[in-house]
């Protein structure tokens, strides 16, 4: 049998080593080979979710996240009163077919997400849920998982990340108690503040994100998110987000995704755009 030339062996070894360096198994706490990211947006009644959708789209566009399996859910609200913020066009533009609409049809969205989750769990992956809202949808999801996989250790395999005291207060009391008892529940510092251990992604000052974002599709997403946010902010008794009223940005719900992927050390919105904008 002929031996491969030493130069060819060196090239093959270098290529394999380079591929290994460029394709890490883990991004922070997330295993890119097996896990699934669920990002659940209440969209009621604060328009900050819209900016958070654009932020998630920006992060996922980064090459480091090319192997991340994800799904977004709109309308995962709890007991709060007030009108919903419709943003289906933004979800479709950002996530294509990787999202479900729990506002229009809760049961259909639950069935879609349950199917995705069961497939990942059966293959050995974990589920990471970023709660850009309340935990009522998660409670229904986990209950269904337990019915389908009664032997699954949900406290080890399903991770919920929440940053907001208010979100917990307007989650159904029984639902909040259920997810805390049956999942690996993480309450992280609030993403509205800077210097508390997670990024502070809320700014009442104008953010020059246009200087950092270069991809046309991402620019379109941010413009759409900002336009819709301005259109519905404080309208018809919806919550008036003062940061957005003053012309700033609020993607504070995205702090949970940053935490999951190990970017909790980012200081604020400027650090986010420096890290992921180009």
Image (cartoon, rainbow, N blue to C red):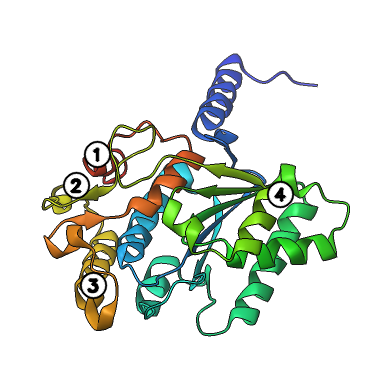
Say which quadrant the C terminus sits in. top left
Report how far apart the C-alphas of labels 4 and 2 lie in the structure.
42 Å
Classify mark 2: helix, strand or loop.
loop
In front of the other: 157 or 7: 157
The 10 Å Cα crowd at callout 3, few under 14, some 14 to 19, many 20 or more, is many
* Residue drawn where x is 18% and y is 61% of the image: 242
Q: What SS does tag 4 mark?
A: helix
Whether the residues at callouts 1 and 2 have beta carbons within 8 Å, the answer is yes
The residue wearing badge 2 is 212
Q: Which of marks 3 and 2 is nearer the N terminus?
A: 2
Image-based side of 273 in relation to 88, left or right: left
Residue 260 visible in image: yes
Mark nearer the viewer, 3 or 1: 3
Give above or below for 205 relative to 9.
below
**Label 1 belongs to which residue?**
274
Q: Position of residue 238 (x, y in %)?
A: 29, 76
Q: Residue at x 62, y 18 (%)?
A: 5
Residue behind mark 3: 233
- Vertical placement of 87 versus 122: above or below? below
Earlier-in-chain disc, 1 versus 2: 2
Using the numbered discs, state the Cα–Cα distance from disc 1 to disc 2 in whole angstroms: 7 Å
**Which mark is in front, 3 or 4?**
4
Mark closer to the chain start, 3 or 4: 4
Mark pair 3, 1: CA separation: 27 Å
Q: Distance between the residues labelled 3 and 2?
A: 25 Å
User: Which is more N-terminal, label 4 or label 1?
Assistant: 4
Tag in front: 3 or 2 = 3
Residue designated by label 4:
181
Q: Please, is residue 83 above or below residue 122 in the view?
A: below
């Amino acid at each position: 049998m002929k031996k491969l030339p030493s130069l060819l062996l060196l090239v093959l070894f270098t290529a394999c080593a380079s591929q290994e360096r460029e394709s890490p198994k883990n991004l922070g706490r997330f295993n890119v080979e097996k896990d699934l990211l669920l990002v659940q947006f209440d969209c009621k009644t604060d328009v900050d979710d819209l900016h958070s959708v654009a932020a998630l789209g920006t992060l996922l566009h980064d090459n480091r996240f090319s192997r991340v399996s994800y799904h977004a859910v709109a309308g995962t609200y709890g007991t709060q009163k007030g009108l919903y913020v419709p943003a289906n066009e933004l979800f479709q533009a950002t996530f294509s077919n990787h999202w479900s609409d729990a506002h229009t049809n809760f049961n259909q969205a639950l069935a879609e997400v349950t199917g995705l989750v069961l497939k990942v769990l059966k293959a050995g992956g974990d589920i990471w849920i970023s709660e850009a809202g309340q935990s009522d949808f998660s409670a229904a999801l986990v209950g269904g998982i337990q019915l389908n996989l009664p032997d699954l250790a949900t406290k080890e395999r399903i991770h919920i990340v929440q940053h907001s005291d208010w979100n917990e207060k307007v989650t159904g009391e029984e639902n909040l108690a259920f997810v805390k008892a049956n999942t690996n529940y993480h309450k992280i510092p609030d993403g509205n503040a800077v210097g508390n251990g997670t990024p502070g992604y809320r700014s009442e000052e104008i953010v020059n994100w246009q200087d950092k974002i270069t991809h046309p599709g991402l620019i379109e997403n941010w413009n759409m998110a900002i336009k819709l946010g301005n259109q519905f902010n404080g309208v018809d008794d919806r919550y008036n987000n003062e940061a957005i009223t003053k012309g700033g940005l609020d993607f504070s719900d995205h702090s949970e995704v940053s935490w999951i992927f190990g970017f909790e050390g980012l200081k604020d919105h400027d650090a986010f755009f420096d890290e992921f904008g180009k």
